[in-house]
Amino acid sequence: MSKINLLLAEDEETLGLIIKESLETRDFKVTHCINGEDAYRAFINERPDAVVLDIMMPKKDGFTLAQEIRKTDKTIPLLFLSAKSQVQDVVDGFNHGGNDYIKKPFSMEELIVRIHALLGRIAQHTTEDQNRIGSYDFNFNKQILSHKETVYSLTHREALVLKLLLENRNEILDKSAALLHIWGKDDFFNGRSMDVFISKLRKKLASDPSIQIINVRGRGYKLIG
């Protein structure tokens, strides 16, 4: 059984190390960051299975970080840790993209159970809902897009672009965030490469007129269908 790759953003270093060491004895691989900027870079580079965020952090707070993560990944389990315990604080956590919210102090057993529950829910949702695009079937792991008797083999990055579009279905996929997620760098040349992938995907999806990938000028792309 492979380990769960977890990103932990917690600026209290002692608490962060305790959480990291505890989780690593329970089949987790943990990347610990002590500020929001480092955590976002780790998210881009590590592609974790789940994210646990403190809210009050230097350089970039947990709410801002969560919103940036959600620009490229709508489905990754995201759990907030916070000493704030008012009802509005919890509501704010969910409004900023969180799937769950744990108030400090908490037990490691509770944290682990909640992470596993979120991973189970997201996996089920992805299996049931994320692989159908109109009359097409999309298998990200096999990098295959199929329509009736026609099967298209996708490149890894082509599949990643389609996955991001699908996760942001009927919403704008921010181009800059997508470039950072796929290439690790937002520059002109990678932007042109992404435009080429978008054109190729449009052609492959042309058999179903209900599906469109539109350009949103100055912002990114939107998959409609």
Image: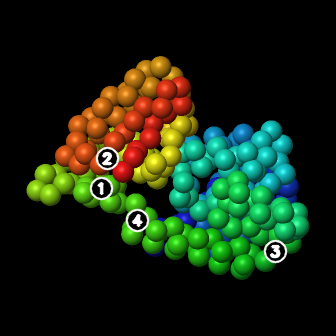
Q: Does residue 172 sit above or below 106 in this rendering?
A: above
In the picture of the structure, the residue carrying the numbered disc 3 is: 106
Position above or below: 80 against 120: above
The answer to whether 190 is drawn above or below residue 105 in the figure is: above
Quarter of the image holding residue 25?
Answer: bottom right
- Upstream in sequence: badge 4 or badge 1: 4
Q: Secondary structure at mark 3?
A: loop
Dot in front, 4 or 2: 2
For residue 142, say whether it is visible.
no
Report how far apart the C-alphas of labels 3 and 4 lie in the structure.
33 Å
**CA distance for labels 2 and 1:** 7 Å
On the rendered structure, is 18 left or right of 185?
right
Closer to the camera: disc 4 or disc 1?
1
Mark 2 or mark 3: name the one nearer the start of the chain.
3
**Residue designated by label 2:** 211
Q: CA distance from mark 2 to mark 3?
A: 46 Å
Labels 4 & 2 near each other (Cβ < 8 A): no
Q: Read off the residue under disc 4.
A: 129
Q: For residue 7, what is the image quadrant?
A: bottom right
Q: How is the image coloured?
A: rainbow
Labelled pair 2, 1 in contact (Cβ < 8 Å): yes
Q: Are marks 4 and 1 in contact (CB under 8 Å)?
A: no
Residue type at the position of mark 1: Gly
Q: Secondary structure at mark 2?
A: loop
**Residue flagged by tag 2: what amino acid is it?**
Ile
Residue 63 % position (x, y): 75, 50
Q: Amino acid at mark 4?
A: Asp
